[in-house]
Amino acid sequence: MIIMSQMKKDAGYLAAGEVKDGQILGLGTGSTTHYFIEAVGKRVASEGIEVMGIPTSYQSFLLAKAANIPVTTLDEHEIDLAVDGADEIDPKFNLIKGGGAAHTLEKIVDYSAKEFIVIADSSKLVDTLGAFPLPVEIIPESVTPVMKALKDMGGVPEIRMGQLKDGPVITDNGNFILDVAFSAIENPIHMEKDLNAIPGVVENGLFTEMVDKVIIGFEDGARFI
Ligand code: 5RP
């Protein structure tokens, strides 16, 4: 039985093969994009391809530096290809993201890319989004009214707490994360917009109608689905 990390690695390495010399890359966040960044770094070293990366978190910024991928910003460059992970992927390639609390910058980067490829292991494929609690980044001062609004929408929100850090997780942007349990997310396209209309919500982890391609790592290797 192949381990999950091998499926993630296979997906990340297959995506790195899609990168073309000269491209500006959106660098997603998480354990799967870790392998993508590592593999792009190997192509930079072995083939001499010249690329630049726009990180979506401090994690991907540090990984890019370690892989000798020069980093740039959205102020200076447009993104040719963004590659990012996901917590859930439905049959229409709508996503839940934000398991790593990076979905706000991920959405800015991924949505602005000319091409957006999602990479994941096969456990992320679902029929309907919602088993994974939906991450919502909020302004800390808004926690009480936002939690009330989310309950009114049928959700059960919880403040994400730190590991090896007392108190709430603080995002790269200085905000809180609410993980919101919904019984099922039947209309992710509407919900993505509705959640962002709540004052205090910075961004939610639904990514709808934006993915171009999905690469899944299965037990027998990775492939486009
Ligand atoms: C971070 C994300 C990640 O892409 C998502 O959580 C998937 O992570 P992993 O590749 O570690 O399973 O959205 O905010």
Image: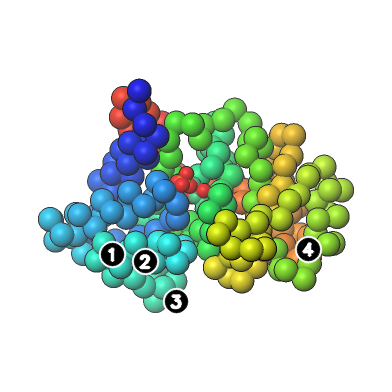
The three-letter code of the residue at mark 4 reads: Val
Q: Residue furthest bottom?
A: 75
Disc number placed over residue 143 in the picture, else none: 4
Q: Quadrant of residue 189?
A: top right
Point out residue 164 in the picture as x, y percentages from the top left corner: 55, 59
For image coordinates 33% across by 49% down, the residue present is 35
Instruction: Look at the image and tell me in which quarter the C terminus lies.
Output: top left
C-alpha distance separating marks 4 and 2: 30 Å
Identified at 61% across, 58% down, the residue is 162
Classify 10 Å Cα crowding around label 3: few (below 14), some (14-19), many (20 and above).
few
Q: Earlier in the sequence, mark 3 or mark 1?
A: 1
Q: Nearer the viewer, mark 2 or mark 3?
A: 2
Q: Which mark is residue 66?
A: 1
Tag 2, which secondary structure?
Answer: helix
**Residue 181: where, in percent of width, then height?**
72, 42
- Find residue 62 and name its label: 2
Mark 3 and mark 1 in contact? Answer it, CB < 8 Å. Answer: no
Decide which of tag 1 and tag 4 comes sooner along the chain. 1
Of labels 2 and 3, earlier in sequence is: 2
Work out whether 4 lies above or below 160. above
| Label 4–label 3 contact, CB within 8 A | no
Q: Is residue 108 left or right of residue 213?
A: right
Checking the image for residue 75, the label placed there is 3
The CB of the residue at mark 2 lies under 8 Å from ligand 1: no
Q: CA distance from mark 2 to mark 3?
A: 20 Å
